[in-house]
Image (tube, helix red, strand yellow):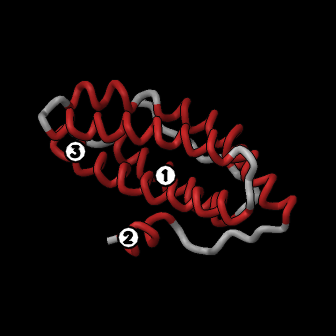
Amino acid sequence: MPIIIWSAAHELGVQAMDRTHQEFVELYNGLAGAGDRDFAARFDALLDHTVAHFAQEDRWMVASGFPPTAIHRSEHDRVLVQMRDLQQRVAAGDVAAGRQVVDTLPAWFDEHAATMDAALANWMRRVGYRAQAGNAASAAAEQV
């Protein structure tokens, strides 16, 4: 499985968003290197992070009045539906299917961050919205 190498190109200039994206990259890379025995648990951790990550971005979009919130949210919803379906397949023992789909995440992440998340980051700076400090991992813990 390919890994994601964090670089300055991934930084969007909103510290809380950049930190959340770094967490995603770390979790994804852990999943990419996982053996079959650990794959399901690592995938679950990535999904939990992604749910919290998207919820955090959703709060920022609403609070900052981001005009294309519905479009950005629909992309998040689409990805979560796919990830939850994949989670069920992996839990049923289809790790090969999991690896095949997860192989597409680096390209998706790079494009999503460079387009939709960059637009959100630019908007937040433009309107002077300051994202709350924290990370998706702590947000996930708060939801439990």
N-term mark: 2 or 1: 1
- Residue 75: % across, % down: 55, 38
What residue is rendered at 64% in x and 73% in y? 132
For the residues carrying marks 2 and 1, which lies nearer the camera in this image? 2
Q: Amino acid at mark 3?
A: Ala
Discs 2, 1 touching: Cβ within 8 Å: no
Q: CA distance from mark 1 to mark 3?
A: 16 Å
Residue picked out by circle 2: 143
Counting residues from the start of the chain, the first of labels 1 and 3 encountered is 1
- Residue drawn 84% across the image and 68% down it: 128
Query: Residue 47 placed where, x, y %?
Result: 36, 49
Q: Residue 24 bears which disc, if any?
A: 1
Please tell me which residue is depicted at 55% across the width and 55% down the height of the picture. Answer: 22
> Residue 103, located in which quarter of the rendered image?
top left
Q: Earlier in the sequence, mark 2 or mark 3?
A: 3
| Residue 81 drawn at (x, y percent) | 38, 38
The residue tagged 3 is 40
Under mark 1, the amino acid is Phe
Mark 2 burial class by Cα count in 10 Å: few <14, some 14-19, many 20+: few
> Would residue 106 appear left or right of 35 to someone viewing this image?
right
Q: Are marks 2 and 3 in contact (CB under 8 Å)?
A: no
Mark 1 and mark 3 residues within 8 Å of each other at the beta carbon: no
